[in-house]
Image (spheres, rainbow, N blue to C red):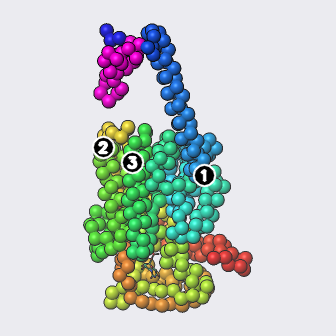
Amino acid sequence: MPSLEEELFPSTPGKFKIDRGHTMNRQFNRCFASTSTMFLWALFLIALTASYLSFQSFVDSGSRYFTASWGGIQWEKQIRSSAQIHRSKGMSVLVTGAAGFVGSHVSLALKKRGDGVVGIDNFNSYYDPSLKKARKSLLNSRGIFIVEGDINDARLIAKLFDIVAFTHVMHLAAQAGVRYAMENPHSYVHSNIGGLVTLLEACKTANPQPAVVWASSSSVYGLNEKVPFSESDRTDQPASLYAATKKAGEEITHTYNHIYGLSITGLRFFTVYGPFGRPDMAYFFFTRNILQGKPITIFRGKNRVDLARDFTYIDDIVKGCVASLDTSGKSTGSGGKKRGPAPYRIFNLGNTSPVTVPTLVLILERHLKVKAKRNVVDMPGNGDVPFTHANISLAQRELGYKPTTDLETGLKKFVKWYLTYYGYNRGKAVH
Ligand SMILES: O=C(O)[C@H]1O[C@H](OP(=O)(O)OP(=O)(O)OC[C@H]2O[C@@H](n3ccc(=O)[nH]c3=O)[C@H](O)[C@@H]2O)[C@H](O)[C@@H](O)[C@H]1O
């Protein structure tokens, strides 16, 4: 039988080991005159260590709450309340990029039908953050809480999954924009690859695992010439770093599906536009310039061929996103281990009727009742592709996706929103 002395100071490798030498033994006996005194000393030491450790953890968590922009009882309460489901068989969805264009619209649609929604957004300044704050206020007024934080913050994401057992993640946070990738390439790697992996790590570890629906891009079709673009077409000739990071996202999500059993749906969005849109997109800053009497630059393709896009209205995209969440199927893993195969899907969400950029400008002029000052130049080699055109039959079949808004109607709604939002209707424009 091991002695009490051996039990208290076991000789496990790496742990403290007492010297059984004669001298030590004498000193030891002097300090601990009897076994019972030694026992009391040991208890005292254990209690001291335990109280020190709990004090340390109190200081740690306390300082985190004091220094981090997130955390605290009130913060957690807001998250729980925002995630509450108000319909039978509803879902609780973590929406990344919730203060963004598509993210804000999808969040509102989900909340409206009774799903629980928690947003996360880093409110970066890629474009005017006041527009993001305005979207946030709108969401707040509908009971949606947006966490201010980055998807690269693994501790924050893990905390959100601790607080809420999200059934779904709608991942829309990204560094968008095709041409900006030449100016700031690392921001694309940071958000579209680093951020994606951080989020997927949290999803894979969560128990239960959520189903993930995320935004890929029409740009993955790159320099393909076969039209319309189908999901099974090649996607290995990206024309921009933006496209390359979205393509990488498709491969990365595939590995998480394969190894960990995460249900994944990737949506290839085709040039989404509409109210509360992104000011870095052509239709948006063309509108601003036309109203301000400034020239717009229209790019023209090889052999003077007009560029064309399969512009897709936001409400149609929202329907596609919601239908993807509804049909996502379940992730099969738990505790980071796959238990069986899970769905892996990719869909085009386009309008399937491309319109040239000069026609877009004509429609804007009509709705704005202002003539544009055109400056037509050859398309610079900046990552743009000459045209996009979606084959949407797969989304039609699997999601019931059916876009209903043509560019004429959609831009009319956008212009109406723009004039109101920027104060043109009140006679004082604010930009
Ligand atoms: O489907 C996508 O996956 C992408 O859609 C969007 O990219 P694009 O289709 O390139 O939209 P956008 O910039 O509005 O340019 C529209 C047209 O105007 C032309 N264009 C542009 C600027 C200019 O000054 N002049 C011009 O002619 C330009 O050459 C182009 O022909 C998203 O921004 C992107 O984040 C991604 O989601």
Which quarter of the figure has residue 253? bottom left
Place of residue 357 in the rendered image (x, y in percent of width and height, measured from the top left)? 45, 82
Task: Identify the residue under disc 2.
Answer: 341
Label 3 amino acid?
A: Glu
Disc number at residue 201?
A: 3
Nearer mark to the viewer, of 2 and 1: 1
Cα distance in 3D space between marks 3 and 1: 25 Å
Instruction: Tell me which numbered mark, 2 or 1, is placed earlier along the sequence.
Output: 1
Question: Is 218 included in the stretch rendered in magenta?
Answer: no
Q: In the rendered image, which quarter contains the N terminus?
A: top left
Q: Which mark is residue 340?
A: none
Residue lying at 50% horizontally and 48% vertically, measured from the top left: 156
The quadrant holding residue 29 is top left
- Residue behind label 3 places its C-beta within 8 angstroms of ligand 1: no
Circle 1 — which element? loop
- Tag 1 or tag 3, which sits nearer the N-term? 1
Q: Which residues are magenta?
A: 4-29
Q: Front-most of 346 and 97?
A: 97
CA–CA distance in space, label 2 to label 1: 33 Å
- Residue at image position (39%, 69%) is 185
Front-most of residues 206 and 222: 206
Q: For mark 1, what is the residue? A: 144
Write the residue at 56% across / 80% down: 287
* Residue 19, quarter of the rendered image: top left
> Disc 2, disc 1: CB below 8 Å?
no
